[in-house]
Image (tube, rainbow, N blue to C red):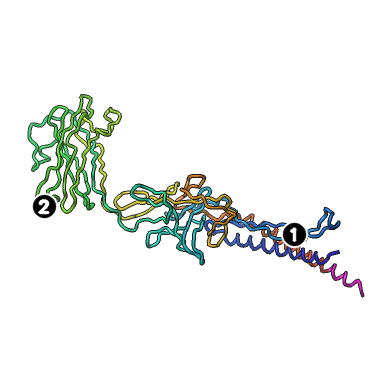
């Protein structure tokens, strides 16, 4: 009889059930923690002595012990927050962070996407760790991994280089016999279309394009800019002129004189191309180009130019592929970078260092880093957070079983104690 072994078996059970309640209690405490991954405890038997000698197959165990506590990386539910820097991952992967926290410095991984933009423009987690990704440059998003940063300084202006003006002209208009007069442009033309362009300083200027019918199926245009914005004089300055010819079906056949040269005061000289759509008529059927039909009145069908003023960042959004798009006050929208995600061969082997952070270990393997929504990595959901994956009902069941297990093991100890006492009392 090994009554002492019974006592230690009961003690091992008490310790095991206590640890299970710790894990369950921690899960319940984090039921509302963003990105929290529930822990799961597992036990194993402690092998004891053989009851049939060293050669016998029968053995009595010596109790139980913890074999491990691992994170359960199932997908949590999503909550829409409306905060642009809140991010969630739909699928596999972890956000990558770099910096120092809790005395440790290096690379960390998390599913908790509560980010903010610091005073230097870096996207950071609460502890100041910087979110890693692929920064955008003049040539687009690069493949160089680094800290994601949104610009805090204004975006530079861009001078206009091309104007696309698509006109709808009245075929039945009378041919003009008078000459075009720069001093009286509206009185010596049939139609005027205006476009705002930008110089090298980002200043806006209005250019008026006056169109007049000079022959059947032929129109002449004159581009004028305010003289006071060029040399300080009054009136208008002609910066370009040309012709448009149409066939009998009303389709644009030729356009000439599309080059405009102008130097606005204080800015660099700039050459602009005025395109009336002939180059856009890819199908050769007149679609996309200026046209001449029997309509009542002339009109501007479409108008675009490629310049812009300087602008400040007003907001961001994150697309499912992790691209961070910035919206600027000048109406421009451009890619600022792309969020990187890391995958692991064995995520349960990651070391939990607290603060919803994990670090790589030999058990987890090295991170496979790449862009979101590629290579098996999940999509990024902007203005959304992944909630804790703790199943409260399941945790309460685990809590009940741990409590009952603790009570049962306590009974083992008290019973073994009574047997021990009876054994001691055999000798009176």
Q: Residue 3's image quarter?
A: bottom right
Estimate the x, y position of residue 365 in percent, counting from the top left.
56, 52
Residue at point 46% right, 62% down?
99
Q: Is residue 90 above or below residue 59?
A: above
The chief SS type of the magenta part is: helix
User: Quick check: marks 1 and 2 in contact, CB under 8 Å?
Assistant: no
Give the residue at mark 1. Answer: 46
Task: Measure the alpha-carbon separation of dots 1 and 2.
Answer: 96 Å
- In the rendered structure, which segment of residues is drawn in magenta? 418-428
Residue at point 37% right, 61% down?
120
Judge depth for marks 1 and 2 and give the one in front: 1
Give whichever of 19, 235 is nearer the camera.
19
- Helix, strand, or loop for circle 1? loop
Which residue is farthest front? Answer: 55
Q: Residue 410's image quarter?
A: bottom right
Left or right of residue 154, residue 48 in this image: right
From the image, which quarter does the N terminus lie in?
bottom right
* Label number found at residue 315: none
Residue at point 70% right, 62% down?
16
Which residue is farthest top? Answer: 248
From the image, which quarter does the C terminus lie in?
bottom right
Give whichever of 297, 38 is nearer the camera.
38
Q: Is residue 361 magenta?
A: no
Estimate the x, y position of residue 282 in percent, counting from the top left.
29, 31
Give the residue at mark 2. Answer: 232
First in sequence: mark 1 or mark 2?
Answer: 1
Left or right of residue 137, residue 59 in this image: right
Estimate the x, y position of residue 251 in percent, counting from the top left.
23, 28
């Amino acid at each position: 009889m090994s009554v002492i072994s019974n006592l230690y078996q009961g003690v091992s059970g008490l310790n095991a059930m206590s640890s299970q309640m710790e894990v369950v209690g921690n899960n319940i405490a984090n039921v509302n923690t963003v990105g929290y991954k529930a822990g799961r405890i597992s036990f194993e038997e402690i092998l004891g002595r053989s009851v049939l000698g060293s050669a016998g197959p029968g053995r009595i165990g010596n109790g139980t012990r913890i074999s491990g506590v691992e994170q359960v990386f199932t997908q949590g539910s999503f909550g829409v927050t409306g905060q642009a820097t809140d991010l969630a991952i739909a699928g596999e992967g972890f956000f990558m962070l770099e910096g120092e926290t809790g005395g440790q410095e290096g690379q960390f991984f998390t599913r908790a996407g509560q980010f903010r933009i610091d005073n230097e423009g870096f996207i950071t987690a609460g502890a100041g760790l910087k979110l890693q990704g692929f920064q955008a440059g003049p040539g687009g998003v690069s493949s160089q991994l680094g800290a994601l940063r949104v610009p805090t300084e204004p975006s530079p202006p861009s001078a206009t280089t091309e104007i696309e003006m698509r006109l709808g002209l009245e075929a039945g208009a009378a041919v003009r016999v008078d000459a075009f007069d720069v001093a009286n442009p509206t009185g010596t033309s049939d139609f005027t279309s205006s476009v705002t362009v930008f110089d090298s300083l980002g200043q806006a200027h209005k250019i008026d394009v006056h169109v007049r019918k000079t022959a059947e199926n032929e129109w002449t245009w004159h581009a004028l800019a305010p003289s006071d914005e060029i040399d300080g004089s009054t009136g208008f300055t002609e910066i370009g002129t040309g012709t448009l010819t149409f066939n009998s079906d009303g389709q644009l056949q030729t356009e000439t004189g599309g080059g405009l040269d102008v130097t606005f005061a204080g800015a660099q000289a700039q050459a602009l191309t005025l395109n009336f759509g002939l180059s856009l008529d890819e199908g050769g059927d007149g679609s996309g180009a200026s046209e001449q039909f029997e309509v009542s009145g002339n009109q501007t069908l479409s108008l675009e130019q490629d310049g812009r003023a300087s602008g400040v960042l007003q907001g961001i959004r994150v697309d499912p592929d992790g691209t961070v798009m910035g919206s600027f006050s000048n109406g421009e929208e451009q890619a600022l970078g792309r969020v990187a995600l890391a995958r692991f061969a064995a995520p349960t082997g990651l070391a939990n260092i607290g603060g919803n952070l994990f670090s790589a270990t030999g058990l987890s393997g090295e991170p496979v880093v790449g862009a979101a929504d590629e290579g098996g990595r999940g999509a990024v959901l902007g203005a959304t957070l992944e909630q804790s994956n703790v199943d409260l009902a399941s945790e309460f069941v685990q809590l009940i079983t741990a409590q009952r297990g603790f009570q049962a093991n306590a009974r083992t100890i008290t019973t073994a104690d009574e047997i021990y006492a009876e054994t001691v009392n055999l000798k009176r």
